[in-house]
């Protein structure tokens, strides 16, 4: 079953939202951050949000991996959203969490990640991996690695560093593609139930460093 990487468009937003939802479902922190209840059309709303971001943000680059042997509605099995911040990062925008979110938990996680990112990068230009999700039915086939490698090659072409915030699930894959750990953010979310820490690694790929 051949895999191909292709540019994604707003027409792919609904499938992207479906993949994102399925990929997050097993995460023990998902129910803490987004407890719901959710309306039946929640994926349509998320798809609209993703499409609007793509349309309005000139720094955004969307890519998808398709399995050409699958039926058309299921061909897209993975997607990524990269940003090219060639002139440095944009000013921070207000974070608005929806009515289905645990606002306090989301502020703790996403606010802490944003603060760490700003501290590490210090305003430098960079290529940023904002989203990467693979349909759980198609994980460990190399689709995520293809999307990561696109960003690495684009950063190399531009002479910029590439940056991402890695979860436990993706950490090893990013290391295999040349990203190195900068900082570990380990958050205690036990007040909402989980006993394990929520770990996020700040990771950089630097074109000036020799490949490992």
Image: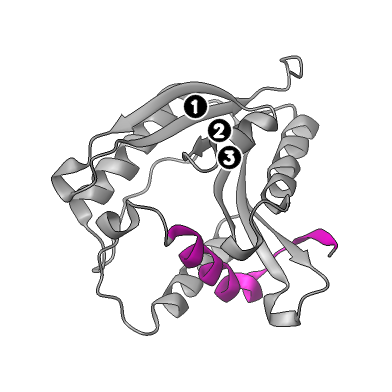
Q: Based on the displayed image, in which of its 4 quarters is residue 108 positioned?
A: top left
Quarter of the N terminus within the rendering? bottom right
At numbered mark 2, what does the secondary structure look like: helix, strand or loop?
A: loop
Sequence-wise first label, 1 or 3: 1
Q: Which of the 4 image quadrants contains residue 174?
A: top right
| Most common secondary structure along the magenta stretch | helix
Of the two numbered discs 1 and 2 on the same chain, state the one appearing first in sequence.
Answer: 2
SS state under label 1: loop
Q: Is residue 87 visible?
A: no
x, y percent for residue 61 = 66, 53
Q: Nearer the viewer, residue 42 or 51?
A: 42
Q: Which residues are magenta?
A: 2-24
Distance from the alpha carbon under mark 3 to that under mark 2: 11 Å
User: Can you tell which of label 3 and label 2 is closer to the viewer?
Assistant: 3
**Disc on the earlier residue, 3 or 2:** 2
Report, in whole angstroms, how far the alpha carbon at label 1 lies from the one at label 3.
13 Å
Residue 123: numbered disc = 1
Disc 2: CA contacts within 10 A as few (<14), some (14-19) or many (>=20): some
List x then y, in percent, for residue 10.
Answer: 62, 71
Question: Which residue is at 59% across, 30% downward?
Answer: 125
Q: Which residue is mark 2?
A: 88
Towards the viewer: 27 or 211: 27
- How far apart, in angstroms, are the residues tagged by discs 1 and 2? 6 Å
Q: Which residue is mark 3?
A: 128
Residue at the spot 58% in from the left edge and 71% down from the top edge: 13
Q: Position of residue 52 (x, y in %)?
A: 52, 68
Tell me whether the residue at label 1 lies in contact with that at label 2, contact meaning CB atoms closer than 8 angstroms.
Answer: yes
Instruction: Residue 50: tell me if it is visible.
Output: yes
Compared to residue 5, the image places residue 11 above or below, namely below
Instruction: Classify 208 as above or below 172.
Output: above
């Amino acid at each position: 079953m051949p895999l191909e990487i292709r540019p994604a468009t707003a027409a792919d937003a609904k499938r992207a939202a479906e993949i994102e939802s399925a990929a997050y479902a097993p995460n023990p922190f998902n129910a803490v951050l987004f407890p719901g209840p959710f309306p039946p059309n929640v994926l349509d709303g998320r798809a609209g949000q993703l499409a609007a971001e793509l349309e309005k943000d000139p720094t955004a680059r969307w890519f998808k991996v398709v399995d050409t042997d699958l039926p058309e509605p299921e061909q897209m099995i993975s997607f990524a959203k990269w940003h090219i911040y060639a002139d440095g990062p944009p000013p921070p925008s207000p974070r608005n969490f929806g009515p289905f979110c645990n606002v306090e938990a989301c502020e703790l996680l996403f606010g802490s990640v944003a603060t760490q990112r700003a501290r590490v990068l210090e305003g430098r230009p960079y290529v940023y991996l904002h989203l990467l999700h693979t349909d759980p039915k198609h994980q460990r086939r190399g689709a995520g690695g293809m999307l990561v490698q696109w960003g690495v090659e684009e950063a190399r072409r531009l002479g910029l560093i590439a940056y991402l915030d890695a979860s436990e699930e993706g950490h090893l894959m990013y290391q295999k593609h040349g990203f190195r750990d900068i900082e570990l953010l380990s958050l205690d979310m036990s007040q909402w139930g989980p006993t394990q820490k929520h770990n996020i690694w700040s990771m950089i790929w630097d074109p000036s460093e020799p490949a490992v």
